[in-house]
Image: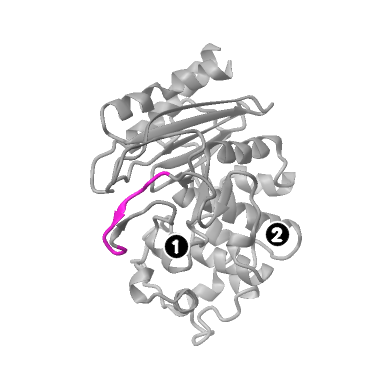
Amino acid sequence: MIETICETAFAPARLAVARGEIPGATLGVVSANGDRAVRLAGAAALRPTVEPLTRDHWFDLASVSKVIATTTIILQLAEQGRLDLDRPLTDVIPDLRQYDVANAAERQLTFRDCLAHRSFLPAVEPIYTYGDDPARLRAFVLQREWRQPQPGTPPVYSDINFILLGIAIERITGAPLSAWRLGDGLGFGQPPGPVVATEYCQWRGRMLKGEVHDENAYALGGAAGHAGLFGTVDGVLGFAHAMLQGALLSPAMMAHVRTPQFGHRTCGWERAFPGWSGGDRCSPDTIGHTGFTGTGLWIDFGRGLAWTLLTNRVHPSRHTESGIFTLRPAVGQALAEATTAC
């Protein structure tokens, strides 16, 4: 059954590759009992030479790092009693806006605020343009007086939230994010196998392959709370299977992941809502997250099924129309329909 579901759901991605909209795509599907299937098509790289895509290729997971790594680690630390989700970040980062302790709004932000993207922090900031020393840039993030939104403006999805959470993890554990073991086929830093190419970076002056695509994550040392994780399709499926089994987090911590905290956002993840990236046919008890490079992971607890769509849609440039925003829900839709038919 799982093979049929994967084959049917992969049809939109296979067509996108054939049309030249994206260089390559890999779809992996896993059930709660561990059955899995993988389909792939296209190229891991087009430039400087064409490289066929294989199941062993590592993808830059981009913002999927936020859920596989940062959210999971934060919740595990909370379970161990090393942080309180509803306490301010200053419990572990006392120097956050340390020159304005009486007035700095950042000092009131809680771990849950950042996980659920309900802070006032901006979506993104070109942190990499302020220097090239990771320690100095971390200090910049902590001491920056972030611009405030207009009154009445709702909070936005923010990389800064997760950069702060990454710094908190480093403070609590006394080790960089790259020291955290996430399972086979997942890791920060240079992958140990073949890697999918992303974009020709104008700032770095080279085609990126094996180094993090996100400029801020690169400037912060390659591993940050918002990006920097690489993974194979089987590595991502291994994580998804563990989530389906409840093997990574206690029931209490899993509730934070599956329960809305702010709008359609849970702690770290998005919960299914009309028009979202996972398609409109998944069960209401579905969570997911996407990554800028063309990646995504969705976990349908109601159906006991998870899937990851990994593409290199930014290769060789992000400044082309890849159709990724229609491709993702099309795959989710096809998968749901195939699941119902089986």
Q: Determine if the magenta segment contains residue 59.
A: no
Of residues 298 and 35, the one nearer the viewer is 35
Q: Position of residue 248 (x, y in %)?
A: 70, 45
| Lower sequence index among marks 1 and 2 | 2
Q: Note whether 181 is above or below 307 in the view shown.
A: below
Of residues 118 and 319, the one nearer the viewer is 319
The residue singled out by tag 1 in the image is: 217
> What is the three-letter code of the residue carrying label 2?
Ala
Q: Residue at x 45, y 18 (%)?
A: 8
Q: Determine if the magenta segment contains residue 197.
A: yes
Of residues 115 and 274, the one nearer the viewer is 115
- The part of the image, by quadrant, that contains residue 315 is top left
Tell me: 201 left or right of 250. Answer: left
Q: Position of residue 197 (x, y in %)?
A: 37, 46
Residue bounds of the magenta highlight: 196-204
Q: Note whether 48 is above or below 331 in the view shown.
A: below
Q: Residue at x 28, y 48 (%)?
A: 318
Q: Note whether 217 is above or below 186 in the view shown.
A: below
Of residues 46 and 165, the one nearer the viewer is 46
Residue 330 visible in the snapshot: yes
Image mark for residue 78? 2
Crowd around label 1: few <14 · some 14–19 · many ≥20 (10 Å): many
> What is the three-letter code of the residue carrying label 1?
Ala
Q: Note whether 169 is above or below 310 in the view shown.
A: below
The answer to whether the residue labelled 1 contacts the one labelled 2, judged by CB atoms less than 8 Å apart, is no
Q: Secondary structure at mark 1?
A: helix
Residue found farthest to the front: 49
Q: Main secondary structure of the magenta part?
A: loop
Q: Work out which quarter of the rendered image holds the C terminus and state it.
A: top right
Colour mapping: one colour
Residue found farthest to the left: 320
